[in-house]
Image (cartoon, rainbow, N blue to C red):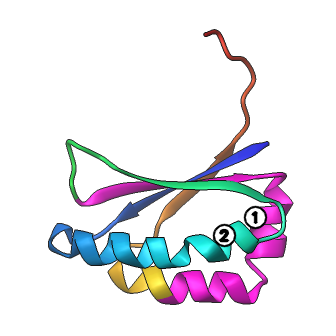
Amino acid sequence: MIKEVAQIRIDPARAADFEAAVKLAAPVFKDADGCRGMSLERIIEHPALYRLIVLWDSVDHHMVTFRNSDGFQTWRGLAAPFFSEPPIVDHSENVSTYF
């Protein structure tokens, strides 16, 4: 399982509308091949900053399959108008869980 973390900066005055747009996009991720989960977190200390966390079977499921899909275009159409700068995206995998 791969975790995609997208750091997204928006205008905090538009937070409710952004969160509503991400909620509308959730079914797109749920239907995406290789997608296993999705969540949105708002950074308490920086209200303009969010983390979109998406669980994928592989990096290719995100970077190739999803990015080349109509679903990706839907996602971007809903969320991108709120971006104040391009998102910063990385992928990680768990190497150990201690408790």
| Element type at mark 2 | helix
Horizontal side, residue 65 vs residue 71: left or right: right
**Residue 73 disc label:** none
Residue 35 x, y percent position in the rendering: 75, 60
Q: Would residue 7 be found to the left or right of residue 5 on screen?
A: left
Report the number of numbered marks. 2
61 in relation to 28, above or below: above
Residue 76, by quadrant, is bottom right
Q: Position of residue 63 (x, y in %)?
A: 76, 67
Which residue reaches farthest left?
Answer: 13
Residue at screen point 45% across, 72% down: 22
| Amino acid tagged 1 | His
In this picture, which residue range is highlighted in magenta?
A: 48-77
Q: Residue shown at 57%/81% (left/top)?
A: 75
Q: Is residue 24 above or below residue 45?
A: below
Pointer 1 residue: 62
Q: For numbered disc 1, what is the local secondary structure?
A: helix
Residue 28, by quadrant, is bottom right
Specify whether 73 is left or right of 12: right
What amino acid is labelled 2 in the image? Phe
Residue named by callout 2: 29
Q: Label 2 neighbourhood size at 10 Å, few (<14), some (14-19), many (20+)? A: many
* Lateral position of residue 63 relative to residue 3, left or right: right
* Residue 84 visible to the viewer: no
Which of the 4 image quadrants contains residue 79? bottom left
In this rendered view, identify the residue nearer to me: 6 or 39. Answer: 39
